[in-house]
Each structure stands twice: as structure tokens, then as C-alpha cells.
Image (cartoon, rainbow, N blue to C red):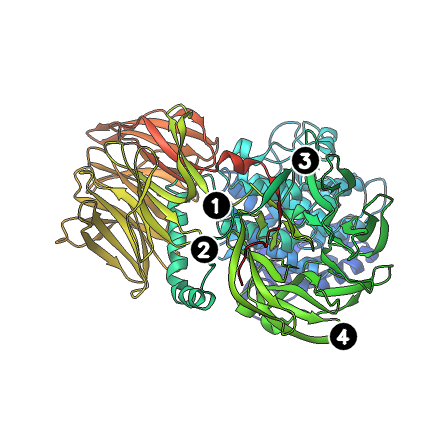
């Protein structure tokens, strides 16, 4: 049925058709009552003609209409005009995600932003008991304000309503309005269905997370996660196969995204993230720089530097107060740790830390037993127990998480299969204590009381260790914006307990992200310390994470107050910010067990040739390198290095051996670029008073410093200096991070800075050609970052160099040769440009080698090699260390 313009359905006048599909036809319409434009969806006859289906549909629609969320398309009305059943929805302007993906994968920043918005929308719906069941790119609309989910909840009704042998025909009728065009390829929705849906089982929120994983995969790679030449082969692929890792197709996407997508796409719902909220937290961590982005520095490194400066400017006063109050972590020399050994995993297996394996490391109170997790099955950590001093561990359970101990060390408790279970350390079958759908943490006192979090978005509950129904112990404080209570442990009296509260969103208060002391027989609580970490109590001290350090601080059990400075105990301890959990355990007799070697932000410098092969040994010690520059003679390096405590960057000079000399002190400094004469460096420096940044030149000899330009209320990152030393290219953006432009700062000091490339899009990473006649930059004007070149100082036409999206690039130093990273293929590319009377002639791009993960990059001025800040080899595999007498020598 097609409606003509002017047709009226109740108060809604049809204006024009928008689209059509198996779920009906959609029209642009005018609401005469409220004088607004709406979208009207006319439902197909098989819905309208069946009274039972219609009644059920109306109930679903009423429930969906109660969802108010900025990233869910609002449902205004459901009505009937004669024999025509229709929905009235919010009218959206933009394009579907399916349309956008037709042009290729999304840039990492856009992918993460949209992914976080989709996860937030799913979380909102799931909390109200509504499952989408038809999440796919065609049901995601990209608008100016972000993404909007469409058709929310309708697929749930459709899938559940018909219980006949024709289910497959119903699914086909629900397919996307944008089918694949290849001959013989299965259409639409099948490619995003979870295995349990294809098997005819009931789908729940975790089925949406499977579909979300498939959508994220497509956003990152431009390819569907599962394909097949027939319906049967596609279903087989979903049920049996894992798609190629994202890093194999798009190496420059954030590495941690691999884990998120892989977990979402687990075949067994129990092995996936259990809530959309947890997925959102993981994506937020990646977006905030929790994973090395693996993009060329012009996008990843420079953008990271710019965001670091934004944070510094916004939080400088708060940081100063925090440093004064805490005295910061005391880094005075302390006695060396008594490291006795490393724990080794079973043969041919690796330790698993982070995500669901966070907290897998534990020690029994008597120090005899240890637990750990391995990667026996992808996305499903296997929990093991081992007696210290012995070499053979015992496998407890696949999918076991967050173990904790009885006070007598006899029993180990853990979560598996949606239940809290316990098992004797010496051996025996597991015993179910209670239901725990998505349990977190746990404590066990001598009176047989267990406390834990049944869900990551709930309070703490209590249950008898002998079994029973959990009862609430703590309640989330809405006035503080709290969204989770977790990591509960008992103090020695068995009456008081510690737990972490955390909050998200604009309404959150700082004291919400903290450790509190609670009491079994009271609703009162006491703030102990502001930190987002699990804690342990041993040897009279509280242990928790600060930055990348495991620290200990004295805790007085009579007054329940901490005193003294936090003292470092171990460094580079594995910590997953998405779970707010560090992987360590302590016993009552002074033994410490901790995981390391995975995650973190420390990198090491390595030289590579233009074939992508490493040259020589790592240069100097590892650090958190954020940006690099090589001197014209290739003998020295300027590097911005973040302080391991405060995170504030400063500049250092390195010689050919990697030996470091500090170059700046005081205010945070970033993005160093060598001057051609080799006796000076241009860089960006924080200006707290002006809430902005300065462009500074400082001489090596004598330390003379000169401010060339100031950008109040803006972020300015130096990106290049012309070969004659007369101009500096600067990337400038507002503190709200909306849009950035390329400015030119003359080094003479007598001429004013000016914007050379400016638009509503992002223009970043300006770089000069060796002859000084051209300037390259990256722009997002096409919807994805691409490399462009314009005449310098202008005016003139611009020329697009890359076509498949780029993670960064610029002139190599060899004439008009350019290097850039191809987002579509993950290859480093080379292209020769030729100046002509009409401008530039762009040659054919040639693939050089696959890109690798790195935090910062610099190309030598002769174009023969480049320097990368890459994760150290030791960071590629988790290690578990054992420390005895960890508290020995710590002074009060």
C-alpha cells in the first residue's frame, strides 16, 4: 500500500515517502495538532489484520514510548485509521549508518563516539526490560546531534509473535531495506543475529550485544563480521566461526577494540559482556586513551597531546589541590621488594588479566593457595588453583570469575554460570550458594556471612555461606550519581567492610568515586579514601592503585582512619579501568601476588627502515612518550614524556644512545619540533593563567626562551617548522574541542599569527614540504580524515592525496614524496607528487608495509628511516609475580 501526498491518518498529513522495507512503509508527515514534522510508519497487513498480534504490538509500543533518551528515536503515537495501523515517530534528518558504511569504515574517534552512544541507548532500553532484537546499521541514523536507534523493540514483538515452521519467512520479512547486492549473498538481519536467535532460543539483552559487536566490527573494518554465499553458509558462519581480528584488517584501530568486539561476539551469551553499560565503559576507556591507538602521530599522537593539554588546563587548579592534599605518592627510596619468583601458567597457555579476568589473581589468607586465569577458551577465562611451592595447578572451571576466600582458607568462592559457587581448595565438586547473574567481588567473614555485588550496577548484598537468598546491604546514592558498588571485603572484625562506590555522568560528585567503610548492622557509611580501585587490607595497611602504582597506606582499625603517605609497593600492576579493578591479591602472612606486563602506557623507542623492519636495539629506557621529533642531522631526538605520577608532559632531549636530558621544567610542554639550525626547539606550553597555550621557541645553548604566540582559551599544538626556520605550523582548537584549524606563526615575532586552513571540519597536522612551497594537512571535511596539500603561503587550489581515509601523514623529506597510513588497508603508503604549471600531479600510491601499534612517530629528514614509540616486548604477555614480606621495611 502506497499513500499519496495529502493523505490523512488522523491528525497526520502525509507529505512524502521516505523509504520502505519488510517492516512497512515510512512517510514524512505533518502533525496538524502540534505543528511539527514527524515520521509515520504504516505497518504491513500481516500485523494489522491479526487482532492478537495488534494488541500485543500496542502493548509493546506503549512500553517503548516511555523510553526517553537522546540516542533513541522517540515514539510519539500508535494508532489505527480504518484498516491502516501506523506508528508516529520523531522525524530525523541525516543518513543511516548503513549508508555511511557504504563509503568505508569510520575513523576511530567517530567509531568510538557513535559506539558509546549506541551502548548508552541499549543500556537505557535494557534497564526497562526492552530488547531491540534487530540492531543493525540500517536501524542506526546518524544525525548532527549523534546517532539515533530506530525501530526499538519492534523486532522483539515480531520474533516472539509467530511460533510456526515459517519463522524463517518472518525473519526474511524483517530484513533491512538496504540488502547486499552481491548475487547469492544472504540479505539483511541474519548477519547480525546472535547464535541463540538462529537456534530458536529466547533472546535477551546479550543478544543485542552480539549484534552490537557485529555493528562495531563493520564500523571498524568496513566489512561484515559474518558472510556466506547462501543462507545456510551464513548461519553456519555465525554459529561456528570467528571473524578475522579487527587488527588484521584495520591495524590502526585501537587494539583494545579487538577485545571488546571479540567479547561481544562470543557464541555463548554467558561469555559476552553481560550489560551494555559494561561495553560503554570499555569504549569510554579506549576513547580516553586507555589503549594505544596505533595511529600515525599526526592523528593519534597529536590529538592525544591536544586532549592531554585540554585536560591539564581544565584541571590544573584541582590537580594542584590534590597534590597538596595527598603529598602525592612518596617516591623516596624504599627497600627493594623481596621478589622470590614468578608464577608460570600451565604448559602452552597464557595468563589472562583484565576484563572478566580482572581479579582472577587471589591468595588464600594463609598464603598457601593462589588462583589465576588463563586463555584456554577465547573470551572465556579459565580459573585455576595452585598450591604455592608446587608446579601443577588444578583447573577449577571455565568462565569462573572474581574468586575470593573463606577466612580459614578452606573454601574458594567464585562466580560462574550466573551463580555464586564455592569449592574446597583441596578438591571436590563446586557447590552453588545463590543466584548471581553478573557477580562482582566478594568478602567472607568468620560468622559465615558473604558479601558481594550481584550486578555491576547494584549495591552490595549479603548471603549465608551455606546458601540462601541474597538480601540488600547497601543502596546506590542517587544524589551522588552513583552507578555501582563493588569490590566488597571484610575488615578483620568481620563486622565492618570496605567497598568501592563509583559514579558517571554530569551529576556525579567526586566523593562518589571512593572507598567507603560500611557495617553489617547499620546503613551508615564512612568515606575512607577517594580512589577508583579495589582495595585489600593486610599487615595493618590498605592496598590500592594510584596511577600505575600499587600503594600501601596505614589504616587505624580503632578509628577507621588512614594516615601517612601512600608508599609504592609494586609498579605496572595490571589494571582495567573499565572494571575499576587491579589484578593483585595479598595473604595474611605477607605474600603479594600481582599481574603485570599487559596494558599501561609506557613505550620504548625503536628505529625502523622504510620496509618496516626494526633497525638496532631499543633506544634508551621505556617511558610514556607522547610526541617525538628528530633533529636535521639525525643525531638527537626531542621527546615529550608524561610524568608517571601526575601525567603532565615535559620535554627531554635524547642522544644517539638514548641518554636523556631534561629540556623543560615547570608548566606542561608538548609537541616539540626541531629548528633547522639544530640549536632550538619549537613547542607548545600550557598557560594556566590564560586557560590556553603558548607557542614557544627555546634555544639549546643558553636556554633562551621566547614566546612567539599565545592562544588564550584555545589549544595550540606545534606540528612543523619550515625548512628555512621562518614559519611554524600550529594546530589550533577551542577548549570545547569542536573543530581545529591550521595556523601559521612567523618566527620573526614581528608578524601576527594567522589561520591558513580553516573550515567547520577538523584540520590538523600541518606540515611543510622540504622546498617550503607546499603545506600538507589532514581534514575530515569528507566525513573521514584524508590527506590534502595546498600551496604555501597561498593562495591556490587544494589537492587530495589519500582516498581511503588516513591515520596521518606528510612529506617524507625526499622532495615531494609523501608518506601516509591507509585506514582501509592498514598499510603505510608512499606517493610521489610532481609540481606542474597548474598545481600538483598526484602519482600512484604504493604500499610499503603493514602499520604497527605505536604511540608516537617521527620521520628522519632524509626520509630513510623513522622512529616509533612502541609497546615493549614484555608488554605483550602477562606475567604474575610473587613477593614475600612485601611490607618489610615500609616505615610508618
**Visible in this render: residue 407?**
yes
Which callout, 2 or 1, points at the residue further toward the start of the chain?
Answer: 2
The residue under label 1 is 601
Residue that badge 3 annotates? 345
First reached walking from the N terminus: tag 4 or tag 3: 3
The residue that mark 4 highlights is 521
Q: Which residue is mark 2?
A: 331
**Residue 226's spot in the image, x, y percent?**
65, 34
Q: Residue at left 55%, top 46%?
A: 97
Front of the two marks 4 and 1: 4
Residue 76: x percent and y percent?
Answer: 64, 64
- CA–CA distance in space, label 3 to label 1: 25 Å
Q: Secondary structure at mark 3?
A: loop
**How far apart, in angstroms, are the residues tagged by discs 3 and 2?**
32 Å
The disc, 4 or 2, on the residue closer to the chain's N-terminal end is 2
Q: Between residues 360 and 738, which one lies in front from this camera angle? A: 360
Q: Residue furthest front?
A: 889
Amino acid at each position: 500500500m502506497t499513500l499519496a501526498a495529502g493523505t490523512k491518518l488522523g491528525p497526520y498529513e502525509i507529505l512524502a515517502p521516505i523509504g520502505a522495507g519488510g517492516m512497512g512503509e515510512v512517510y514524512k508527515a505533518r502533525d496538524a495538532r502540534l505543528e511539527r514534522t514527524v515520521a509515520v510508519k504504516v505497518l504491513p497487513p500481516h500485523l494489522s489484520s491479526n487482532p492478537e498480534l495488534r494488541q500485543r504490538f500496542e502493548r509493546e509500543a506503549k512500553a517503548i514510548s516511555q523510553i526517553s533518551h537522546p540516542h533513541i528515536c522517540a515514539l510519539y503515537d500508535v494508532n489505527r485509521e480504518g484498516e491502516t495501523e501506523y506508528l508516529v515517530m520523531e522525524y530525523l534528518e541525516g543518513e543511516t549508518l548503513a549508508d555511511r558504511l557504504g563509503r568505508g569504515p569510520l575513523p576511530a574517534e567517530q567509531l568510538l563516539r557513535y559506539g558509546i552512544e549506541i551502548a548508552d541507548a541499549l543500556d537505557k532500553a535494557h534497564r526497562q526490560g526492552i530488547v531491540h532484537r534487530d540492531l543493525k546499521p540500517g536501524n542506526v541514523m546518524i544525525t548532527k546531534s549523534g546517532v539515533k536507534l530506530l525501530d526499538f523493540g519492534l523486532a522483539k514483538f515480531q520474533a516472539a509473535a509467530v511460533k510456526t515452521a515459517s519463522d524463517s519467512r518472518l525473519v526474511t520479512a524483517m530484513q533491512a531495506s538496504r540488502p547486499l547486492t552481491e548475487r547469492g549473498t544472504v540479505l539483511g538481519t541474519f548477519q547480525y543475529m546472535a547464535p541463540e536467535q538462529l537456534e530458536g532460543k529466547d533472546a535477551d539483552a546479550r543478544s543485542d550485544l552480539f549484534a552490537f559487536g557485529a555493528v562495531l566490527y563493520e564500523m571498524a573494518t568496513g566489512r561484515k563480521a559474518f558472510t556466506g554465499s547462501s543462507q545456510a553458509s551464513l548461519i553456519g558462519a555465525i554459529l561456528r566461526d570467528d571473524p578475522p581480528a579487527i587488527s588484521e584488517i584495520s591495524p590502526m584501530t585501537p587494539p583494545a577494540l579487538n577485545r571488546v568486539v571479540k567479547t561481544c561476539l562470543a557464541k555463548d551469551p554467558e561469555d559476552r559482556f553481560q550489560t551494555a553499560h559494561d561495553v560503554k565503559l570499555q569504549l569510554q576507556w579506549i576513547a580516553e586513551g586507555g589503549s594505544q591507538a596505533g595511529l600515525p602521530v599526526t592523528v593519534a599522537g597529536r590529538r592525544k597531546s591536544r586532549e592531554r593539554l585540554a585536560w591539564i588546563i581544565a584541571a590544573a587548579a584541582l590537580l594542584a589541590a590534590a597534590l597538596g592534599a595527598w603529598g602525592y605518592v612518596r617516591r623516596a627510596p624504599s627497600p627493594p621488594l623481596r621478589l622470590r619468583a614468578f608464577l608460570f601458567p600451565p604448559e602452552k597457555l597464557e595468563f589472562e588479566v583484565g576484563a572478566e579476568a580482572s581479579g582472577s589473581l587471589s591468595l588464600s589468607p594463609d598464603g598457601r593457595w593462589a588462583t589465576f586465569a588463563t586463555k584456554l577458551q577465547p573470551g572465556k577465562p579459565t580459573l585455576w588453583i595452585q598450591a604455592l611451592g608446587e608446579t601443577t595447578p588444578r583447573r577449577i572451571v571455565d568462565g569462573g570469575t572474581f574468586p575470593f576466600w573463606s577466612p580459614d582458607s578452606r573454601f574458594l568462592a567464585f562466580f560462574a554460570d550466573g551463580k555464586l559457587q564455592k569449592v574446597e581448595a583441596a578438591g571436590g565438586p563446586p557447590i552453588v550458594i545463590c543466584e548471581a547473574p553478573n557477580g562482582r567481588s566478594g568478602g567472607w567473614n568468620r560468622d559465615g556471612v558473604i558479601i558481594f555485588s550481584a550486578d555491576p550496577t547494584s549495591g552490595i548484598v549479603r548471603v549465608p555461606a551455606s546458601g540462601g537468598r541474597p538480601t540488600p546491604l547497601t543502596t546506590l546514592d542517587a544524589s551522588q550519581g552513583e552507578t555501582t558498588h563493588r569490590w566488597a571485603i571484610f575488615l578483620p572484625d568481620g563486622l565492618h567492610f570496605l567497598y568501592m562506590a563509583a559514579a558517571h555522568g554530569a551529576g556525579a560528585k567526586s566523593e562518589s568515586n571512593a572507598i567507603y567503610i560500611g557495617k553489617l548492622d547499620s546503613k551508615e557509611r564512612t568515606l575512607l579514601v577517594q580512589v577508583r580501585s579495589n582495595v585489600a587490607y593486610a599487615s595493618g595497611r590498605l592496598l590500592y592503585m594510584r596511577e600505575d602504582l600499587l600503594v600501601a597506606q596505614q589504616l587505624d582499625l580503632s578509628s577507621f582512619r588512614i594516615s601517612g603517605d601512600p608508599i609504592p609497593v609494586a609498579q605496572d600492576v595490571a589494571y582495567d579501568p573499565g572494571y575499576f579493578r587491579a589484578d593483585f591479591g595479598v595473604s595474611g602472612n605477607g605474600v603479594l601476588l600481582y599481574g603485570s606486563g599487559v596494558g599501561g602506557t609506557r613505550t620504548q623507542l625503536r628505529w625502523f627502515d622504510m620496509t618496516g623492519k626494526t633497525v638496532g636495539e631499543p633506544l634508551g629506557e621505556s617511558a610514556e612518550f607522547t610526541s617525538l621529533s628528530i633533529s636535521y642531522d639525525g643525531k638527537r631526538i626531542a621527546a615529550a614524556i608524561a610524568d608517571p605520577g601526575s601525567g603532565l608532559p615535559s620535554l627531554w632531549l635524547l642522544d644517539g644512545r638514548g641518554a636523556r636530558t631534561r629540556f623543560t621544567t615547570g608548566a606542561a610542554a608538548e609537541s616539540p619540533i626541531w629548528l633547522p639550525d639544530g640549536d632550538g626547539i619549537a613547542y607548545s606550553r600550557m598557560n594556566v593563567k590564560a586557560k590556553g597555550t603558548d607557542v614557544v621557541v627555546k634555544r639549546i645553548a643558553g636556554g633562551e626562551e621566547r614566546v612567539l604566540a599565545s592562544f588564550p582559551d584555545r589549544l595550540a599544538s606545534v606540528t612543523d617548522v619550515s625548512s628555512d626556520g621562518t614559519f611554524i605550523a600550529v594546530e589550533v582548537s577551542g577548549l570545547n574541542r569542536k573543530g581545529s584549524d591550521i595556523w601559521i606563526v612567523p618566527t620573526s615575532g614581528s608578524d601576527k599569527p594567522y589561520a591558513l586552513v580553516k573550515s567547520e571540519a577538523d584540520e590538523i597536522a600541518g606540515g611543510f614540504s622540504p622546498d617550503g612551497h607546499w603545506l600538507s594537512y589532514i581534514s575530515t571535511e569528507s566525513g573521514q580524515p584524508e590527506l590534502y596539500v595546498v600551496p604555501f603561503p597561498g593562495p591556490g587550489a587544494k589537492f587530495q592525496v589519500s582516498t581511503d581515509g588516513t591515520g596521518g601523514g606528510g612529506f617524507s623529506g625526499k622532495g615531494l614524496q609523501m608518506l601516509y597510513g591507509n585506514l582501509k588497508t592498514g598499510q603505510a603508503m608512499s606517493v610521489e607528487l610532481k609540481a606542474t604549471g597548474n598545481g600538483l600531479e598526484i602519482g600512484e600510491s604504493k604500499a610499503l608495509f603493514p602499520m604497527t601499534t605505536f604511540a608516537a612517530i617521527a620521520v628522519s629528514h632524509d626520509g630513510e628511516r623513522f622512529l616509533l614509540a612502541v609497546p615493549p616486548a614484555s608488554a605483550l604477555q602477562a606475567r604474575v609475580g610473587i613477593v614475600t614480606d612485601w611490607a618489610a621495611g615500609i616505615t610508618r
